[in-house]
Amino acid sequence: MLEKSGERRGLDAFLAPRGIAVFGGSSDPATIGGRTLAYLRKFDGPVIAVDGDGAETVRDSGQSVDLAIINLPPHKVEQAVEDCIASGISAIVLYSGGFADLNAAGAAAQERLAARCARAGVRLLGPNSAGVVTVRNGVYATYSHSIAYASPRPGPIAIVTQSGAVGTFALARGVERGLGFSRFIATGNEADIDIAECIEYLADDAETGVILVYLEAAKDGRSFLRAIAAARARGKSVVVLKGGSSETGAAAAASHTGKLAGADRVYDAALRAAGACRVHSIEEMLDVAQACAVAPIPAGNRLAVITGSGGIGVMMADEAAQYGLVLPPLEPAVVDAVRALIPLAGVLNPIDTTGHILNDFGLLPKVVDAVVGGQAMDIFAIFLATVGLDDAMSRPLVAALRRLRHTRPEKLVAVCMMATDAVRRELEELGVVVFDEPSRLVRLLGAMTRLRTPRSELLSNNEKTPTPHALDIVSWDEAGFRAALERAGLPFPPFLVARSATEAGAIARTLGQRVALKVVSPDLAHKSEYGGVALGVAPEDATAAYEAILARVAAKAPQARIEGVGISPMLTDGVEMAIGVQRDPDFGPVILLGLGGIFVESLNDVALRVLPIDRATALEMIDSLRASAILKGVRGKPPVDREALADALLRISDFALAHEDAVESVEINPFLVRETGGFALDALIVPRRPKGSEYGHP
Amino acid sequence: MLEKSGERRGLDAFLAPRGIAVFGGSSDPATIGGRTLAYLRKFDGPVIAVDGDGAETVRDSGQSVDLAIINLPPHKVEQAVEDCIASGISAIVLYSGGFADLNAAGAAAQERLAARCARAGVRLLGPNSAGVVTVRNGVYATYSHSIAYASPRPGPIAIVTQSGAVGTFALARGVERGLGFSRFIATGNEADIDIAECIEYLADDAETGVILVYLEAAKDGRSFLRAIAAARARGKSVVVLKGGSSETGAAAAASHTGKLAGADRVYDAALRAAGACRVHSIEEMLDVAQACAVAPIPAGNRLAVITGSGGIGVMMADEAAQYGLVLPPLEPAVVDAVRALIPLAGVLNPIDTTGHILNDFGLLPKVVDAVVGGQAMDIFAIFLATVGLDDAMSRPLVAALRRLRHTRPEKLVAVCMMATDAVRRELEELGVVVFDEPSRLVRLLGAMTRLRTPRSELLSNNEKTPTPHALDIVSWDEAGFRAALERAGLPFPPFLVARSATEAGAIARTLGQRVALKVVSPDLAHKSEYGGVALGVAPEDATAAYEAILARVAAKAPQARIEGVGISPMLTDGVEMAIGVQRDPDFGPVILLGLGGIFVESLNDVALRVLPIDRATALEMIDSLRASAILKGVRGKPPVDREALADALLRISDFALAHEDAVESVEINPFLVRETGGFALDALIVPRRPKGSEYGHP
């Protein structure tokens, strides 16, 4: 993988090559090969157009060439790669498609190519790559049409993309709005170099401050997260756009890349853990990049809106609620201070400065000072309509904002107005975000608050190592699952297994209250579907209930092995939650929390996090549920014990991590959380087994 | 209100005045009065700057003046209005604020002004209005700064706004992107003319095809809806942006307009009933306007995405799912037809044409023909990256799209690409939407599908007249509510009221199964909060349960009058729903449906419609719930009887409409819907009473 030491790093031959050979160049600029050669005129090193024997051409040129671009039909690629190896080239950009993107035979050919390159110590970008760009030294090793219309200016923004079209279109759109770029890398089929390695490279790249990522499926989820966390730890903004978040989109992604798009909600949780900002369109990605390229990342999500227009303030407040920002009210002392500056000011937040502000922009830093003095706002968004189009009005505004940036350098200050390019540039150089759409400004400010400190376990160079110990499950049925989870610290009510109807009656009478009966069988994961459960049974009815359960199960699942019927006291006074841990193929175990019973599947109100989690995260999961209103007590019911529920989440999490290699999923449904404490009322553990195994969810 | 006949219509004096008088004009173009006079140089009629005695000045001018603009401090407005009346002016635009927007004294002054104008037959726009614009005849009766930077070109788009700042900023943004406008009206405080009247006027305005509305609260919800429905019936697109959808936003709106923003979800339902398209930002409003100004409204929401880029197709599919569009798969015959044109095409929807399409745009209409031949798609979205920037490539594209529009004029065709202004204009003249952001293109296409046929009852000129009949409720308690709703056709289980513990025992034994007991009291709306309910009681325990209920209620609500305890057979086999009707202050009765019990309040999964509704709407409500998955049967349970639930919705709806004047709300919670049929298990009717009444939800 990536060399950490030495003067040349892993992707240097791509992004800072000494010389470039082009296989399949052309003199016709309407073709892919022709455009590439035309763009490479900007490169200040040697460019060799290969004609005939590749190795010979390169050697004969007498130039130092370390990067090759291959633009040939698939059947000619293998020979070209051999030519590269023979001529000492160490990096290959492979434009050609028709490999894993086409069919199984192509996938096999791609594997052969990757193996050949690996043996020879040659790094491969692609197949199906749209190339690489380094703006500052004129490396335009790409066929992108978009580059034809506008040359990027140098700047801190890098693009890494699994889709050439998405990446080049984003680049073209960014150039159109005047953004400055450092690098562009299209990874294509990722036979060798993947998104994660590119991000890791850019984390250490002095030219890059903002990393824009488009991906559909990470080749290795954990190294992807570690690369993002590394970049975030170095203060770089990482903005991720993931394709395939919908069912139709995921199917389309699978069809054109041959890869399955990962579960969307797991990506959401994983990117949050890594401190990246997830966006949902090319436009939003560029909006965030535009702001991150000039302004500080805010310390929190408290927004003060300052406007001379009631209506715009209303709408920005509406948007803020949607994008995770809060508008704290002003304290009385702050109200007085603002009113001392502007007597008729509206002193809710949004703060309505009335038309006054337009006559005296010097008031702006004073208003901000007054607000900061009281309540620690993190972000100031100031709406100024068309002021930026008017030179005379803009000059005092720029001066006022210069003072403000000087006294409050840590605050994120954004001005929403239409502006001339000159005014915008001047303010951006001061570190002020200038944006002309109120709704998109609020959206991008909300997005910037998602750029957080990554979780610490992602920053270590080693794989996270929980203390694994052997999974000791005596019997693969509810009794065995209970015992294992009880040892892991989860609270269960008594569960006594009756082997006969008479025994059931005796147990129920001993418990002396209403009971729950559940069939115990290693073959029935969801007992209620087979009639294997009876709830709220009076002690004197337990004998009959035992027989009824066995009869129903015998009818519906005649093959199932029956170990008996477990009997517990009937507990109802609390809220039923469902807790589960499942292995995600990309990111490992993830934990889920929702309302119990059937609601967890049907209502789509589930909190999800990538493991491990700490107590703060567990409590945050609980509070993030829409159902958290129920947990706080409704209609006269007392609130439930949040800490007990958090305990349960942490204990299941520890259990799942310790047995990561042995366990596919763990499910407690329901977990009854009560006014004090809580109980697991059911347990299910599914072992990791080869596909096709009978055990598991029906 | 609006005159329907005669040569001059209600707002003609504002939008097509004969002459204009300006009170408070100025020669300084940096002032409001000065800008107004400067803009009015474009007007081709007389403009009189009033100085000194207003009536005299106007009369002395010898000109025919029917519109006055008043730009004076609040205390001078009354005299100016008198001057207008004296000089025969019939329409006044009142810029001045400081009325209902300021405080109660201002509100009283505003009422006096409105009354004076009404007596004199003079129409008033404002106070606090940013004015009116008619582009074609140069009426710029506005002080908007935005107009200074760009003159609108004539076109079909009208803006009607309660916020001057939002409206003028939208106008400036629209002018910047080259849109053509007809009218602009800022209604301000709406002392006389409101949003509804403006929409009604524009519905009949030959110059206007697209009506953009910004509002925070409708003065009269029903006339607002009727005006929208009238405009929709005449084929005009109506796009509504509502401020105050969030709590903070609504508070801000109340503070700057003195009006309460209506319940957001009721607005959603009401606008859907009227066939308007609701949007959520100025930008989205302009996006939809840009498309509606050139292209046909699609017949449905079936979208075909055609792209040469896998990644962009993936993202457009993701967005489509979010904005209510579906991408139907292609049928086998269509797949064959597409493959006959482009052998390597990806034939999912999105359709991946590969690079082929760029070499031969003639393939485009053929691909569309092949797709339309099989599956009736409504919308075609074609991604072409930067093709529109290239003159040579654009020419054959334009020709191909011209053929396509000719053969398929009813389809909505949109091209997503960066384009020169010339290419964009040429395609827009053909009726093709050209848009450069894939995500916003999909969003606007989804928004256009919300432009529907308004519900018929909104199109009649008369108020909807249900057959009201006297509300016959013997007792204001559950027994009385049940009786009234049973007569209205709602199914209830037996409910026998016991007046003593002994009687309770006898009733339960007669029923011969587990029972539910509920206290009957006119003072307790939510019985369970007072311990007034016992469920699943065995017949032999009914006597004790009766006594326990009375003891709990006596402890928690000692003042409550107790009529007895109602006893019903315990029914559990089904899904508990909650059905309610509530009066909305803006729109009259609205009906709500959600899961029963506490979930209706806590989980926020509620379908809401403005009454009346028909059976199709009732079924659509049921299916729109996230909880509808539960109704279809989960974990081996059978699906419930949707038609029975729809019956219940329709019967409650009829009841509420018939008693609209007498009833504030009706609630059935739970309504138990079962495999066959269903039962109302509880009923609550709240009468309309003066505020401060004790009855109602605690």
Image (cartoon, coloured by chain):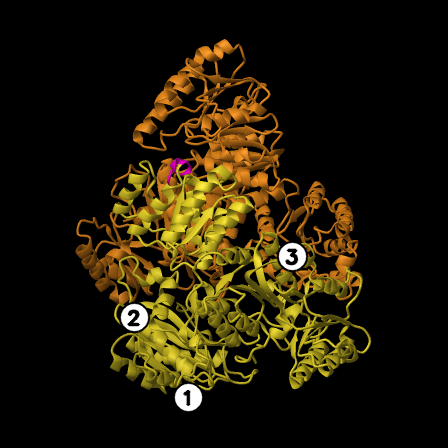
Chain colours: A orange, B yellow
**Amino acid on which disc 3 is placed:** Ser
Judging depth in this view, the residue of A349 and B130 nearest the camera is: B130
Q: In the drawing, what numbered circle is on residue B471?
A: 1
**Amino acid on which disc 1 is placed:** Leu
Q: In the drawing, what numbered circle is on residue B151?
A: 3
Look at the numbered discs 1 and 2 and tell me whether their residues touch, using CB distance below 8 Å.
no
Q: Is residue A462 magenta?
A: no
**Amino acid on which disc 2 is placed:** Glu
Asked if labels 1 and 2 share a chain, the reply is: yes
Q: In the drawing, what numbered circle is on residue A180?
A: none
Q: Earlier in the sequence, mark 1 or mark 2?
A: 1
Residue occupying image coordinates x 26% and y 46%? B332
Residue occupying image coordinates x 41% and y 18%? A81
Provide residue A464's location: percent of width, then percent of height. Answer: 48, 34
Q: Chain of mark 3?
A: B
The stretch in magenta equals B349-359
Q: Nearer the viewer, mark 3 or mark 2?
A: 3
Provide residue B339's location: percent of width, then percent of height. Answer: 30, 40
Q: In the drawing, what numbered circle is on residue B643?
A: 2
On screen, B35 above or below A582? below
Q: Secondary structure at mark 2?
A: helix
Position of A384 with respect to B512 (left or right) is: right
Q: Secondary structure at mark 1?
A: loop
